[in-house]
Image: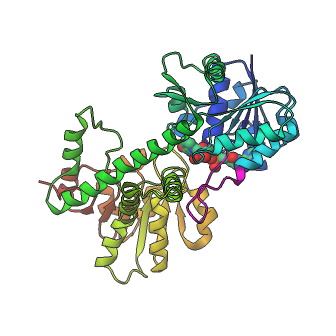
Amino acid sequence: MNNFTIVGLGYVGLTIAISLAQNSNNNIICLDIDNKKISKLKKGIIPIYDKTLEKININNFSNLKYTNKYNKAFKNTNVVFLCVPTPKSPNGSADLTYVWNVCQGIIKNICNDIFLIIKSTVPIGISDEIQNYFDKNSSYKVNVAFIPEFLSQGSCLDNYNNPDRIIIGCQNIKIFNIIKNIYKESFNISKTPIMFTSRKSAEMIKYASNSFLATKISFINEMSTLCEKMDINIEEVTKGMGYDKRIGKNYLKPGIGFGGSCLPKDLESIKFIANQMNVELKIIDSVLKVNEIQSQKLVDLFLCNHSNIQNMKIAILGVTYKANTDDIRCSPALINIDILLQKKANLFIYDPYGLNKLKEIYKDKVKYCTSIDEALKSADVAFIFTDWQDIKKYPIQKYRLLMKKPLIYDGRNCYDINKVKKEQIEYISIGRCKGE
Ligand SMILES: NC(=O)c1ccc[n+]([C@@H]2O[C@H](COP(=O)([O-])OP(=O)(O)OC[C@H]3O[C@@H](n4cnc5c(N)ncnc54)[C@H](O)[C@@H]3O)[C@@H](O)[C@H]2O)c1
């Protein structure tokens, strides 16, 4: 029996807490400094949206406890998961303030030896630094491991419960075996490959993995631009490529670029690290450049054809950086909203789960719509930025019925190009010719 404390109840921390509660009878204390989050959780409300958490009733888990107080969070705890943000600093490096704050809180409050499992994505060498910090300052032994998290938002819990691999970066094989056993007893992972490595290698595995995924996205987006010029449908190209097992079909969907709280900041962070080592990461540089262009490509195209948009009604469908999550951090939609607002556009925005967070940023600068119909009614143009199921399923004919003149810029290729052609709708999408 283990006693866990999960520190930081965001997409990663909450998912881990719920997975632990589903798979074991361990005691789990969930700690966050956000009082609003803790009071919601105490009422049984999950404070974030992810499709795979939607049907979870946390009231069913009597072993989950919530607190915002460090002095209540570590009594009897022997395993701590550290899941706080590591956002981008102005110079591109990862901001480790939250991580170090937690380390200080742990030192002051633990009552016995612990295993500290770092799940936050941290720069190479930081887990070793954290180990040194505890070795020098803690009266109890803190064994630090870095176990990178690979879950993908929108399917947080499914991903977490079915990982492709678990990488345990820690000091030696003895600690590895203890942590491996804790994992095997606490999660349902009997068939998952578990790998022992150094903490630094584990940190590098996380950065290299995210860099590679981002590279695939920018690569296919670049190919999609060439396809547009040559009257080729990118979807046929990706399908043909995806059959090749060496390439695989995942992360080959063209769109308006990657966003979210991980890929953009992790690529900036590895660039910063490489720069300190006097290594130029030419591929990463290009991946970021392609992504920047791709993210605003549709709006740029629209503005080329429409110089004065002040009196236009512009519908925006989807603001989250991907479907099935309410996360709008670094969403390409926001870049486009900012450009359109600079041109004094009237924006009518719909998103099934992203609007609350959007309101915190844009306040009354835009109109928030509760339905797709409301956003489209009498609109001059519609932009699709997120491929939510209800947006993908929305009948294409309704654009013609509701809008002043149907003009759609689809950043997610939600519609079959040949079906749209039959509808006499002006439809611009990514990497696709205009239909046969
Ligand atoms: N979101 C993902 O899909 C994902 C996937 C893999 C790795 N990661 C990494 O995991 C880390 C967490 O990401 P996230 O998206 O879950 O973050 P998040 O922003 O959703 O949640 C972090 C939580 O930590 C809390 N927090 C901040 N400082 C704290 C402190 N001192 N003590 C207690 N709680 C504190 C915040 O209030 C917040 O609720 C990041 O380093 C991220 O790069 C995220």
Q: Nearer the viewer, residue 420 or 83?
A: 83
Q: Residue furthest front?
A: 278
Q: Is residue 67 visible?
A: no
In which quarter of the view is residue 255 placed?
bottom left
Q: Residue furthest left?
A: 436
Please say whether residue 96 is one of the residues in the magenta stretch.
yes
Q: Nearer the viewer, residue 362 or 400?
A: 362
In the rendered image, residue 68, in percent from the top left (x then y), is placed at 81, 43
Q: Is residue 315 left or right of residue 112?
A: left
Protein image colouring: rainbow
Q: Is residue 79 left or right of residue 56?
A: right
Please say whether residue 202 is one of the residues in the magenta stretch.
no
Q: Nearer the viewer, residue 148 or 10?
A: 148
Look at the magenta stretch and give its main secondary structure.
loop
In which quarter of the view is residue 228 placed?
bottom left
| Residue at (55, 49) in percent of width and height | 326
Q: Nearer the viewer, residue 120 or 433?
A: 120
Q: Which residues are magenta?
A: 84-98
